[in-house]
Image: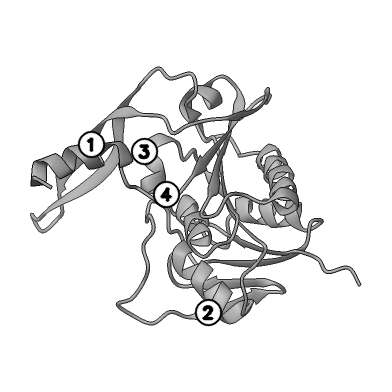
Amino acid sequence: MLVMPVILVTNDDGVHSAGIVALADALASLGDVTVVAPVGESSAIGHALTIAHPLRLEPWRDGVFTVDGTPTDCVNIAVSTVLRALPDIIVSGINKGYNLGDDVTYSGTVAGALEGALLGVPSIAVSLDRRNSAPLDFAPAASAARMLAERVLRSGLPPRTLLNVNVPTGPVRGYQVTVQGKRNHVTKVTESVDPRGRAYYWIEEGENAWEDDVRSDYHAVRAGWVSVTPLQPDLTRHDALQRVEGLLGA
C-alpha cells in the first residue's frame, strides 16, 4: 500500500487568504494536506508563541483547522493535536508580499517554516510580490511551491534548514539560490492625536536602501527570478566569537 507524504500547510495571512487555498490545492497531488492556520491576520508577528492565554482549535472544513493564535502556535497545535505526529514537510504561505532580507525576522510566514525546522521537519516559506493594488495571481507561486516541495520530499534538506522562497510578479526567468539581502533600514513612525487628545502611533514601512549584492534575494526578484534562500535558526555570529572572547578577557 502506497503511503502518501503528510503535508502541513500554514500561513500568517489567515485561513481565509486566497494564498493558502492556492498553496494547499497545488500540494494536494503530492500527499495528504492538512491546513492549520490563524483564524485572522497575523502578519509581521515574527516567531511569537502564545503563552499568556489559552488557544482555541476549530475545524473549518475538511482538512482545514483554525487557531486563534500565531503561525508558530498553529504548527505546534497541528503537530501535537491535529496530526499527533511530525509531518513530512511544512509549507507556509503564500504570503501577500515579499519576505526579503532582514524582513524574515518579522515575518509570520517565515516563522511558520522556522518552527518546522526547529522541530526537525523540512520546511518552506513562500511569498509573492505585491507592488500594486491589482488582484494577485497566486498560480506562479503555487507552482514554485509544489516543485520545491516535491524535490524536498524526495531529497530532503540539511537538518534545521528551511527555504525562504520569494516569487516575483510577471514573467519568471527561473530560480536562483540566494543569500539574505542587506539594507539600511530607517524606521518610519507617524504620530497623530485621537478625538480625546491622546497621542497614538502608526509604525509604517521604513525607507530602505538595499546593498548591491548580486547573490541577494532582493537582487534576484528585482531581475525576475524566483529567489530560494536556505535559512537556519542559528543566529550565532561565529566569526565574532574570538573578538567577544577578547572583550571578556577569556
SS state under label 1: strand
In the image, is 19 to the left or to the right of 39?
A: right
Q: Which residue is mark 4?
A: 107
Name the amino acid, label 3: Asp
Please provide percent x and percent y for residue 243: 18, 37
SS state under label 2: strand
**In front: 128, or 178?**
178
**In front: 174, or 135?**
174
Q: Are marks 2 and 4 in contact (CB under 8 Å)?
A: no
Name the amino acid, label 2: Leu
Rendered image: mark on residue 57: 2
Q: Which residue is mark 1?
A: 187
Q: Residues within 10 Å of mark 2 (few under 14, many from 20)?
A: some
Residue found at x 51% / y 54%: 160
Rendered image: mark on residue 114: none
Q: Are marks 1 and 4 in contact (CB under 8 Å)?
A: no
Name the amino acid, label 1: Thr
